[in-house]
Image (spheres, rainbow, N blue to C red):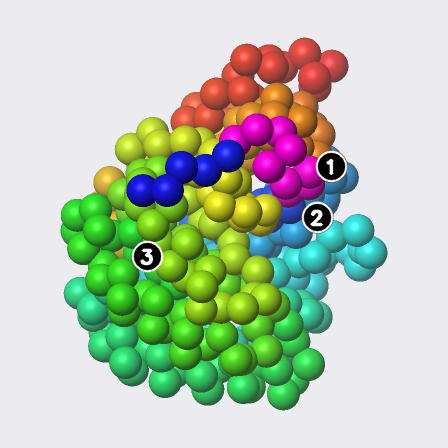
Amino acid sequence: MARHDLSPSALPSHVTLCEVGPRDGFQFEDTFIPTKEKVASIIALADAGLPRIQVTSFVHPDWVPQMRDAEAVCAALPDRDDVTYTGLVLNMAGLERALDTDLQHVDLSIATHDRHSRDNANMTVEEAIEQAEQMIGTALHAGVNVQLGFQTVFGYQEPGDTPLQQVVEMARHFADYDLESLSLADSTGMANPRMIQERVTAIQEVVGDTPLVMHLHDTRGLGLANVMEALSCGIHWFDASLAGMGGCPFIPGATGNIATEDTVYLLDQLGIETGVNGHAVAEVSHRLEDLLNKEFAGTMHRLWGREVMA
């Protein structure tokens, strides 16, 4: 594995964080979070300086009941010049719903592991690619920006069992599409720094100028270590979830993304600007913990304490 320079001069000066808690976090909760509370949380996260927020997903309510108010959430969000709202879309039916809202950005997501694609979407990876092509064309024709996400890039049933060459060829296939960005998801939290270096570098070689986004679940506690390796590979765009809440309902044992507050603290300690007030994010985390009567997995929102709410 190549050694990467982690000196301040070699790291990016600024990192963009996308808050995925209102989708990836909320979807994992059995207790329905009222629409007004979802909207209030999203507004508070925007006020905290998060420049991009994944506000919902357009999935069938029988599968993810928490997201049954997707359209209502989108309709209630105020127009702002300082934040980009996005919604997750997994199929054409979901895309059509998203296009009926005022969202100007959608996050499409497909599997890269054959077993996962069959388990999660009842289709092969080849069929998922064909569907993604149609969805991208439909979204772009409607004037909506598209981020394409690859799921389980670092493994599904065990670390590395998603063939790297398959991921690289998929990235190469979509490199010429007019994508805003390409997201690489560690959906099962199986990545480690060595895998981050190997796979990110290989994908960077084929995607040209398309920005790469890291979507890192912290299931095995390596989330921030993987952030460090990704930074050394030149990545400057990460998803994060307030207080580390969330997980995939369809992946046994899955936990949430890297915690937003923890990630902000790490980047701040490295001298990397995010524009995000981690203490203000912690306020939202505390309010949701009270609402749901539970404690989330993140660290910094607890260490910063509840005095920020005074």
Label 3, on which residue? 153
Mark 3 or 2: in front is 3
Q: Quadrant of the C terminus?
A: top right
Up the image or down, 130 lies above or below 241; here it is below
Magenta stretch: dominant SS? Answer: loop
Residue 225 part of the magenta segment: no
Up the image or down, 67 lies above or below 263; here it is below
Q: Find residue 93 and name its label.
A: none
Residue 225 found in image quarter:
top left
Residue 28 drawn at (x, y percent): 39, 45
Residue 182 drawn at (x, y percent): 50, 63
Residue 11 part of the magenta segment: yes
Q: Earlier in the sequence, mark 3 or mark 2?
A: 2
Question: In the image, is 92 to the left or to the right of 242?
Answer: left
Residue 268 found in image quarter:
top right
Give me the C-alpha separation between circle 3 and circle 2: 25 Å
Q: Find residue 275 and name its label.
A: 1
Q: Nearer the viewer, residue 46 or 309?
A: 46
Residue under the point 59% across and 54% down? 55
Up the image or down, 85 lies above or below 246; here it is below
What's under tag 2, amino acid-wise?
Answer: Pro
